[in-house]
Image: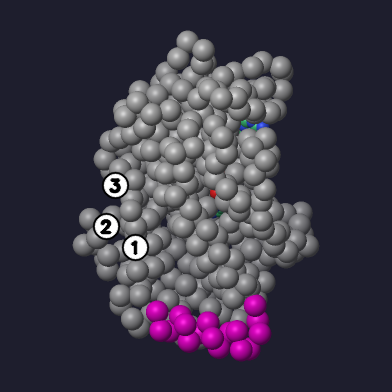
Amino acid sequence: MAAYDADVIIAGAGMTGATLALALESAGLKTILIDPQVFEVQTAPTFDGRASAIAYSSFRQWRELGLAEALEPHAQRIEQILVTDAHTPGAASGRGLRAFLRFDADEIASVSGGEPLGYMIENRHTRMALAAAVTASDIQVLAPAEVAGVSADGAAAVVTLADGRLLRAPLVVGADGRASKVREAAGIGVIGWSYPQVGFVATVAMEQDHGGVAHEYFLPSGPFAILPLTGKRASLVWTESKARGAALKAARLEVVEAHLSRRFGEFLGQVRLDGPRFSYPLSLQLAERMYAPRMALLGDSAHAIHPIAGQGLNLGLKDAAALAEVLVEAMRLGEDIGSEGVLERYAAWRRFDNVSLAAATDIFNRLFSNDHPLVRTVRGVGMGLVNRIGPARRFFMEEAGGAVGDLPRLLRGMPL
Ligand SMILES: Cc1cc2nc3c(=O)[nH]c(=O)nc-3n(C[C@H](O)[C@H](O)[C@H](O)COP(=O)(O)OP(=O)(O)OC[C@H]3O[C@@H](n4cnc5c(N)ncnc54)[C@H](O)[C@@H]3O)c2cc1C
């Protein structure tokens, strides 16, 4: 250890990097977190306007890492998800419309232990809870600081920071997002493409209570989601063409609110914008491998996907739980935590889930951002079938809750 600055150096103190650092620290591994953005910048109201649908298994991990008290006041239970396929804007209530799907938390209560389908939490609150927990821990945070390069020699990975400092550890993790420097240094290529769409995101305040119901509403330009937040508020994710997204961001408040009223219809009463508007470019990007000698990838650096199913962050949190468990087990067995054998165990655990979800979200987006009559018929039949077949509906709900497959201990609510 004398020759090392830490057991694990993590590039990126976003939501996945900070979660991994807390998980490793909970089992006694020494970590350094590096990020160009200090926590105060990450938690400012104008930094990240998104709210994330957090699977109940992901929430169990945060609970296990001591974040429940900070997160629970901001976590809105999702009791029901209503998916509606409609041609024209209007009330997203599903009644009287061509095709709709209804998912209900009560139906999977025996598997979920009475948990909701998920929790909606504004990213800003999650970032605040993670920042407070990291700051109160022994994790060393270097911010603002930027990883400029990584090389691996026989016994260590050497990180070069943009200011010239050098750091050594048996393992470096790239939790540094879509443009990952660690991935580049590792020589890992990516496959994928940009979507001709952006995700327009805003928070709205409504007259009526949402009752914990999340609405996903498929329009020809792409999905439009109304996701319940605490209080009479909701987070909108409005997938639109790039040109329409730019126009929505620039338009006067009254114009955007008029558009929103048309989309919402009457059932949530009057709707007004509650905070700034954001627009996110959308792409699919899969790393060809999840590790290289003494380097591993985590979260969006390994797989960035379309937000249609609200699963991108959940995949990254599953990566964090699996990687932490593999590394802690290796440490306890006296293995080299940066060795190929150990990193292959992590990649093997996560590969199928990450690749299959990336492919599924891509297919869903193509299928649902489409107004071709044949495609509309096929998806209408598909939705009708899933709606009528109880086990199929329950499978989708358990999958969305992250309860399917070989779950790492933290996602089962158990310590490492
Ligand atoms: C519109 C939209 C809605 C979404 N909704 C959901 C949802 O409901 N549910 C869900 O699960 N997911 C959702 N997602 C996906 C989710 O937001 C991402 O998957 C998640 O934020 C990725 O987190 P990350 O920590 O892996 O990467 P990032 O958030 O990109 O963090 C990377 C970090 O690395 C830092 N960094 C960058 N370069 C360097 C460097 N050289 N050195 C050190 N640090 C560096 C950055 O500053 C940053 O802090 C949504 C995405 C979009 C676009």
Residue 319: x %, y % from top left: 45, 45
Residue 128 shows in this picture: no
Distance Cα–Cα, label 2 vs label 3: 10 Å
The residue nearer to you, when weighing 26 against 393, is 26
Q: Position of residue 230 (x, y in %)?
A: 42, 50
* Residue linked to disc 1: 398
The amino acid on which the numbered mark 2 sits, given as a three-letter code, is: Ser
- Asked which quadrant contains residue 10, the reply is top right
CA–CA distance between discs 2 and 1? 8 Å
Q: Is residue 103 left or right of residue 11?
A: left
Amino acid of disc 1 = Glu
Label 2 neighbour load within 10 Å: few <14, some 14-19, many 20+: some
Span highlighted in magenta in the image: 370-386
Q: In the rendering, which numbered label is found on residue 412?
A: 3
Which percent across, then down, holds residue 382?
A: 47, 82
Q: Is residue 185 left or right of residue 69?
A: right
**Amino acid type indicated by mark 3:** Arg
Residue found 71% across the figure and 18% down from its top: 163
Residue wearing tag 2: 112
Q: Tell which residue pokes out farthest to the front in this image.
A: 154
